[in-house]
Amino acid sequence: MRRINFTLDDDTIELLASVADRFYGGNRSLAIRAAVESLAAHSGHEGWVITGFTPEEIHAETKCHCCATEFPTGAILFRPVFERGVSPEALDRLPEGKWLDCSQCAAGHL
Ligand SMILES: [Zn+2]
């Protein structure tokens, strides 16, 4: 453990005190640690992220990549478009193999 100094404005100090009192028995250090851990978990990491989908007519029975619902020949499924970006769901590498989502799952990604 090490003591560090940093500067906060009055509103932030008040908010910190309030969060510390409510959830961490008044311990501001614990409140700060939880806040930083939460920030790290939610701001994500760099990798491949889905930025859109292109519709594709399927020529054989195909399962949705996400919900595994089966779709018949002729149905329209959606192929993800990957770009480099930062997200909690970013993939370290591009997925191999077929990835087609149904419209509901595709909408859930965006
Ligand atoms: Zn689906």
Image: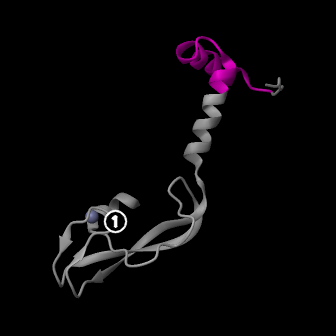
Residue 106 drawn above or below residue 75: above
Magenta stretch encompasses residue 45: no
Q: Image quadrant for the C terminus?
A: bottom left
- Quadrant of residue 67 in the image? bottom left
- Viewer-proximal residue among 9 and 77: 77
What are the residue bounds of the magenta stretch? Answer: 7-32
Residue 110 drawn above or below residue 75: above
Q: Position of residue 107 (x, y in %)?
A: 33, 62
Q: Looking at the image, how many numbered discs can be counted on the residues?
A: 1
The answer as to whether callout 1 falls within 8 Å of ligand 1 is yes
- Quadrant of residue 104 in the image? bottom left
Circle 1 residues within 10 Å: few <14, some 14–19, many ≥20: many
Identity of the amino acid at label 1? Answer: Ala
Magenta stretch encompasses residue 18: yes
Q: Position of residue 90 (x, y in %)?
A: 53, 60
Question: In terms of secondary structure, what is the magenta stretch mainly?
Answer: helix
Report which residue position mark 1 lands on: 106
Q: Image quadrant for the N terminus?
A: top right
Furthest toward the bottom, the residue is 59
Quadrant of the image where one finds ligand 1:
bottom left
Q: Position of residue 34 (x, y in %)?
A: 60, 29
